[in-house]
Image (cartoon, rainbow, N blue to C red):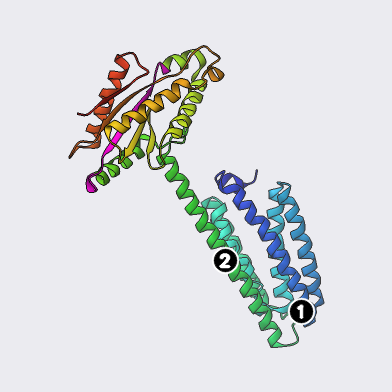
Amino acid sequence: MNRTERRTTPSARPQFWRVALRTCVIAGSTNLLFLLIFLAVGSPILAWVSVGSMTVYAIAYWAIRQRKNKLGVGLIWSEVVIHAALGILLIGWGSGFHYYLLVFIPALAVTLKRSKAIAALLVLWVLYTGLFVMSELIPPLQPLVSRAALDGVNLFNLTVVFAMFSYLALFYIETVIEGQRALRKLASTDMLTGLKNRRHMTEVGEAEISRAERFAMPLSVLLIDADHFKLINDIFSHQKGDEVLCCLTKLLRTELRQHDVIGRWGGEEFLVLLPNTTLENAQLLAERIRGTVKDFRWQELLKDELAVSISIGVTQLLPNETLNRLINRADKALHSSKANGRNRVTAVAA
């Protein structure tokens, strides 16, 4: 695995190599245009250089598709440096081939560690200034026949590099946005069940309370706990316990409305926020959920040795009540369900 792969995240890595493949296609197509341009302006040597460049990019494309990434990237970088140097040597600095070396700046800065990036950028600067000095000391070996042709090549190179910089900027911005989105998801999601975690449920719960009070709508909550869950872990292993929690998550989701909010409150506990729902309707929903879990074919998962049931505490938001008080009352109702034999629903109004 090369250095670039180690420094990118698993989600960003395939995207980076898609960009590398697109670079090969775009660069190969650009060199096809160069071939036609140099044949038209009477520069056969650079026309043959363009043919060689197309061959290099075809090999680089094949190498990256074969996951020989180090070879592919090495070919791309070598082609750019050699092609730029030959273009400057043959038709001069005014051809604009030096623009392509500038594309290395963001690539080096992003893909290498700081110390190595600084060293590589210094080498790039030496190469760039060296080519400039060479162009000042050595006249073009095969100058174009007219100033208009030279200006046309310069404009073409400038346009291509401008487009490449624009594409790279958009790619890096999208990568940053995707990374931020992934971090937000990690911060708000329970990785086992995919539900909202306790921290995020607290934020959503406070927002739902504010909305319920603002529009004078009822808000109810369910606090759900898997019965004898420690026994499941002890008998079948924690891995099987995780499978049970994931299965419970699917069952709970099937019974909830689209605007209901469910999260993993902790361990084997789930919290459900029911906007615009009275205590009576919340209790009916809780009974339906309890029945769905009870009737599920748990023997397929636990080999007829143990069934899974849940206990639920139900309550409704009171005027001027905080989220903590609301959930504490639901927790007391849940403990009452546990104390009275489990596999039952207990609703409390106050």
What amino acid is at disc 2? Phe
Query: Which of these two is toward me, 297 or 250?
Result: 297
Label 1 is placed on what type of residue? Leu
Please give the label number shown on residue 75: none
**Mark 2 Cα shell of 10 Å, populated few (<14), some (14-19), many (≥20):** some
Quarter occupied by the N terminus = top right
Horizontal arrangement in the rendering, residue 40 relative to residue 26 (left or right) = right
Q: Identify the element where label 1 is drawn.
A: loop
Q: Which residue lies at the image location 76% right of the left edge and 86% below the top edge?
A: 145
Could you tell whether 81 is left or right of 301 in the image?
A: right
Q: Can residue 136 be seen in this view?
A: no
In this rendering, the label closer to the viewer, 1 or 2: 2
Relative to residue 70, is residue 34 depicted above or below? below
325 to 99, vertically: above or below: above
The residue located at (60%, 69%) in the rendering is 163
Secondary structure category for the residue under label 2: helix
The image quarter in which residue 42 lies: bottom right
Provide the residue designation for mark 2.
165
Measured in 3D between alpha carbons, the distance from the residue under mark 1 to the one under mark 2, in whole angstroms, is: 30 Å
Which residue occupies the foreground of this view, 238 or 221? 221
- Which numbered circle lies on residue 141? 1
Q: Where is residue 181 in the image (x, y as percent from the top left)?
A: 46, 48
Q: Can residue 338 be seen in this view?
A: yes
- Which stretch did the figure color magenta? 213-229
Residue 101 is inside the magenta segment = no
Q: Residue at x 51, y 19 (%)?
A: 298
Q: Is tag 1's residue or tag 2's residue first in the polypeptide sequence?
A: 1
| Residue 213: x %, y % from top left | 22, 44
Query: Is-magenta flag for residue 225?
Result: yes
Q: Which quadrant of the structure image shows residue 167?
A: bottom right
